[in-house]
Amino acid sequence: MSKTVFLFSGQGSQYVGMGKELCEKYPQIDVFSRASEILGFDLAEKINNSTEEELSKTVYSQPAIMATSLVALEAMKINGATFSAVAGHSLGEYAAMVASGVLSFEDGFKVIKARAAAMQKAAEQNSGAMYAILGKTAEEIEQVCSEIDGYVVPVNYNSSAQTVIAGETEAAEKAAAKFAEMGAKAVKLGVSSAFHSKLMQPAAEEFAPAISGITFNKPNVEFYSNLIGGIQTDFENMPEKLAKHIVSPVRFTSELAALQAAGYENFIELGPNKVLTGLVKKTLKGVNSANVENVKTLEKALEILNG
């Protein structure tokens, strides 16, 4: 029996109408309505009737993506799909916590509401920029960032072909221009600040006390962490760990390598778009990967698992 990990999408993958088709096919899935009660606004209304610009605001995109990922999870479960591990990319780690029982559904949305609010506020206070750098090694990217005047650092180790940098707008622009000179591709990300960098420190400081009363459990499947780039076994002091997560690099490439080394063959991404599926394809050889965001992709993923 091949081992399956469920991966959960990160910020930036949102789009208007995401999750709607699966909810229509499986009306028993009540993720959006349950989440709305905790968030204090109608999540389905926000997802289906916003502009792209409105939906991309951190305060909306984080709970919306998490909820869409959990809709995909419920659709998979209805069809009998099982999994032995979870991993998420940045924001996706919160859906992974709910999926694995580290957080209850209600607590998961209380936590993401607090995180999104803290990060939105920090982004408004400290504008910054993020660029995906393609065609240079992580080591080369670290070297260039260290030589730039101003603050810019690698923050997302996404695949052997892609590392994301973040920092002060001017420093990030200088670094992007330098990479372009060196023949690499620098793609500006549509985000309002420099996530996973020290510019998010105010968010980390606000977030930890806001979630100090939340109960965190041991997971019921293997849990892979961005912070350590591998399996996480210590779930003590989670508010402190999750605050650190906001200002620390996402070691996704290391997580994928650790999952493959542990014998995982099926990498199924749950949530909008297929960013993580693309990263799996670029990083790992000899594994199956698929994303689940609508009826067609659900059927394809089930074929892989049942094949």
Image: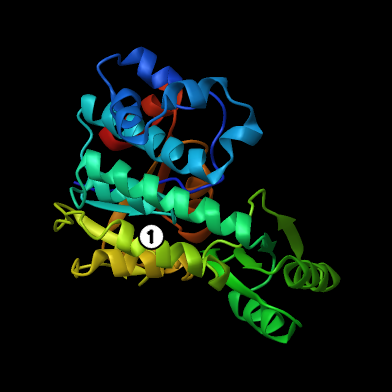
Return the residue nearer the eye: 271 or 245. Answer: 245
Query: Residue 19 appears in which quarter of the rendering?
Result: top left
Q: Residue 40, position in %: x, y?
A: 37, 31
State the scheme by which the image is colored: rainbow
Q: Amino acid at mark 1?
A: Phe
Number of numbered discs visible in the structure rendering: 1
- Determine the residue positioned at 35% across, 26% down: 32
Horizontal arrangement in the rendering, residue 173 relative to residue 282 (left or right)? right
Query: Residue 222: horizontal and vertical position, in percent?
Result: 21, 58
Label 1: element kind: helix
Q: Which quarter of the rendering shows the C terminus?
A: top left
Q: Against 163, is 89 above or below? A: above
Q: Is residue 19 visible?
A: yes
Side (left or right) of 113 relative to 234: right
Mark 1 crowd level (few <14, some 14–19, many ≥20, 10 Å Cα) = many
Tell me if residue 221 comes above or below residue 239 in the rendering: above
Using residue 283 as the reference point, say whether residue 98 is left or right of it: left
- Does residue 271 show up? no
Q: x%, y% of residue 243?
A: 38, 66
Q: Nearer the viewer, residue 119 or 80?
A: 119
- In the displayed structure, 27 sits above or below 266; it is above
Q: Position of residue 48 (x, y in %)?
A: 52, 21
Q: Which residue is mark 1?
A: 207
Residue at image position (62%, 54%) is 124
Q: Residue at x 48, y 69 (%)?
A: 247
- Residue at the extreme right of the image, as rendered: 181
Res. 143 image quadrant: bottom right
